[in-house]
Image: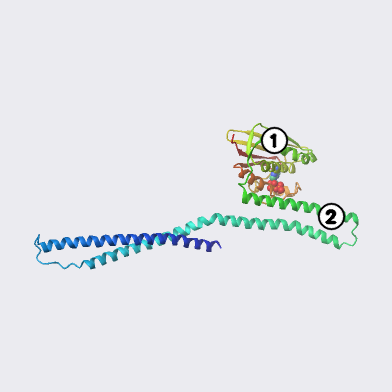
Amino acid sequence: MFKTARLKLTAWYLLIIMVISFCFSFLIYQISSAEIIRFADSQKKRFERQFYNNETFIPSRPVIDIDDLITESQKNLLNNLLVINSVILILSGSLSYFLAGRTLRPIQKMTEDQKQFISDASHELRTPITALKAMLEVSLRDKKLTLNDSKQILNDAIYSTNQLKNLSDSLLELNHLNNNGSALNLVSVSIKDLMFESVKKIKPKAAKKKINIKSTYITGKIKADPQKIGELFLILLDNAIKYSPKESQIKFIASQTKKNITFQIIDRGIGISEKDLPHIFDRFYRADNARTKNGSSGYGLGLSIAKKITESHGGKIEVVSKLNNGTTFTIYLPNFS
Ligand code: ADP
């Protein structure tokens, strides 16, 4: 598809260049022809004047066919213009093909990303839906099913449906950020309020594991989309809780320099291996220890969303981690004050 589009675009570029080149050549030909004729005429008149006035002695009148000379010069001019146009055709053909490739590359990348996203999303959705369907079908065929069993199965089905809803919400969010990342509702918000709200929301989850969140606030404001930044904090705090042992501590620290407002979320949890670190921001990536040792649920979308939110604010996110020794996520957002 992109090969055809590239060839078509090349043809269009070439057509435009050649139309311009032919128009100029035509103009050059007309002007130069007129100049040749004018020059030849003036030379002819001068020569004839000299001959007939007998100003200088010329033994016999030389035979000069001026029309032949003009035709010859015009032919040479035409040939030169044709050679120049052929060179322009070849050079601009290659240049057009190269430029068409460059013009289409971002569109091609976007389409491929979109295709990959749809394929990943349908794969991730199909697995839990198939499992849920199988569980319901098997239960339906079970003739000895008691009321209690049925209730348990319905509870499991509700749990799976909720998980699926979370997954589809995350997918929609990621797709929205990919397509519409710049549509932020930027306002000036208090850094302390932003952090405080996120901690308040996540506290019940931390309390279940008896995890203490120690926040270090700073005063001042930040220009950001409060809803998105709140979501970003929640993703990182939620991960810190998920991947930390019971009764541990998580630190949530804000600081600022002239250039940046920095937020750090530090845990003493399971950590991330060197092998997994380069991939954790990839869509659907989950480290092995997160799947097995920790047994926590997740689809590997949180950090992709976190990265997109940070980047859409003109910031960057970094991670430092050591297996079994904890993880530190650092977010740098531009300081506009
Ligand atoms: P998930 O839903 O699996 O948590 P994320 O995109 O949020 O998806 O995280 C991707 C992976 O990065 C996780 O599966 C886990 O392996 C690793 N990870 C993220 N945060 C932490 C953390 N605080 N401690 C240890 N591993 C983490």
User: Along the polypeptide, which appears first: circle 1 or circle 2?
Assistant: 2
How many dots with numbers?
2
Quarter-wise, where is residue 243 in the image?
A: top right
In the rendered structure, find residue 154 and report the number of the disc placed on it: 2
- Residue 52 appears left or right of 300: left
Within-10-Å neighbours for mark 1: few <14, some 14–19, many 20+: some
Comparing 124 with 166, the one in front is 166
- Residue at coordinates 73% horizontally, 38% vertically from top-left? 199
Residue at the image position 65 percent from the left and 55 percent from the top: 117
Q: For the residue marked with disc 2, what is the amino acid?
A: Leu
- In the rendered image, residue 252, in percent from the top left (x then y), is placed at 69, 36
Determine whether, in the image, residue 97 is placed left or right of residue 176.
Answer: left
* Residue 270 x/y as whole percent: 72, 43
Question: Does 28 appear above or below 234?
Answer: below
- Is label 1 in a helix, a strand or a loop? helix
Disc 1 marks which amino acid?
Answer: Asp
Across and down, in percent, residue 187 comes to: 63, 39
Q: Residue 193 carries which label?
A: 1
Left or right: residue 53 versus residue 200 is left
Position above or below: 167 against 268: below
